[in-house]
Amino acid sequence: MIKTEALRRRERRQALLTVVFTIISVIYLMPVLLVLINSLKANAFVNTETFKLPTAESFVGLKNYVKGMTFGNFAFYKVVFYSFFITITSTALILLCTSMAAWYISRVGSLVSKIVYYLCVFSMVVPFQMVMYTLARTADQVHLNTPWTIPVVYLGFGAGLAVFMFTGFVKSLPLEIEEAAAIDGCGPVKILYKIICPMLSPSLVACALFQFMWSCNDFMGPLLYVTTPRKYPMAIFVKLSMDSTSEGIQWNRILALSLISIIPQLLVFFAAQDSFIDGIAAGSVKG
């Protein structure tokens, strides 16, 4: 009888939590749903019927998406290419360099490695606005002002979080595994990429997601570093579509492009969300 009552209380509590989190999820999804709904309407109805579903009068189908992709003198496929190149290259570069740095910092333990670690941690709390002018000027002087070289700038500014996460995870790994691999003839490079990195995979996925979303959403970085407007990525292209024309601001076109810009991030996040949660938990085991 006591167990039955306890089970009922537990079921009621779980049902209540389900309802609460369902409401929270709907609230979080509302902006995306509103963007989707209004991206299918004529511009005149976006402001007047924002929260209404498209009707026969307001529905225009995919015309807003076509208008957005053919806006201005920019080739849309190039915009998408530059966005993916910057995002994927910068993410891969950060993962490659910071995983090596974190392993060295965790295993060497010298004064220099500790200073480097604390400098990386300190970089996490420095606002971008404090260093954006210096970064932009330096990038321009050393010719890092193109989509092909901007991942190097992202490496310098995004390495702090990755080193912090990877160091915490590597410290939780037993050193005996690496010693056994060394006895079997593995060198440092083989130990890192054959032993450490496979065990580091949850944190690698979590860090990759952070860097992927940051690079995709970054507006100020490419605006400051990239000096050729025709090589701007998607975030700036969406902003350029907001420029007023003879017909006024085309909110339906802006919403259509905004939805296109977030689709890759949604797909990547939902595909890797389980590993993302495991990686966050793993990186906080030790610090």
Image: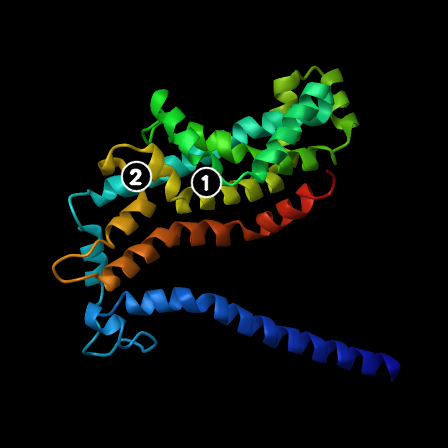
Q: Is residue 53 left or right of residue 165?
A: left
**For the residues bearing labels 1 and 2, Cβ distance under 8 angstroms:** no
Mark 2: few/some/many CA within 10 Å (<14, 14-19, 20+):
some
Is residue 277 or residue 105 the one in the foreground?
A: 105
Residue sitting at 28 percent across and 65 percent down? 39
Residue sitting at 21 percent across and 75 percent down? 58
Is residue 236 or residue 7 the one in the foreground?
A: 236
Q: Secondary structure at mark 1?
A: helix
Write down the residue under mark 2.
81
Occupied quadrant, residue 1:
bottom right
Mark 1: few/some/many CA within 10 Å (<14, 14-19, 20+):
few
Q: List x then y, in percent, for residue 149.
A: 37, 27
Occupied quadrant, residue 14:
bottom right
Query: CA–CA distance between discs 1 and 2?
Result: 27 Å
Q: Is residue 255 above or below residue 97?
A: below
Is residue 8 or residue 115 the one in the foreground?
A: 115
Query: First in sequence: mark 1 or mark 2?
Result: 2
Q: List x then y, in percent, for residue 260.
A: 32, 54
Q: Is residue 125 above or below residue 47?
A: above
Residue sitting at 63 percent across and 38 percent down? 165
**In this view, the mark in front (1 or 2):** 1
Q: Amino acid at mark 2?
A: Phe
Q: Is residue 121 left or right of residue 36?
A: right
Q: Secondary structure at mark 2?
A: helix
Q: Is residue 226 left or right of residue 158?
A: left
Residue sitting at 25 percent across and 49 percent down? 240
The numbered mark at residue 129 is 1
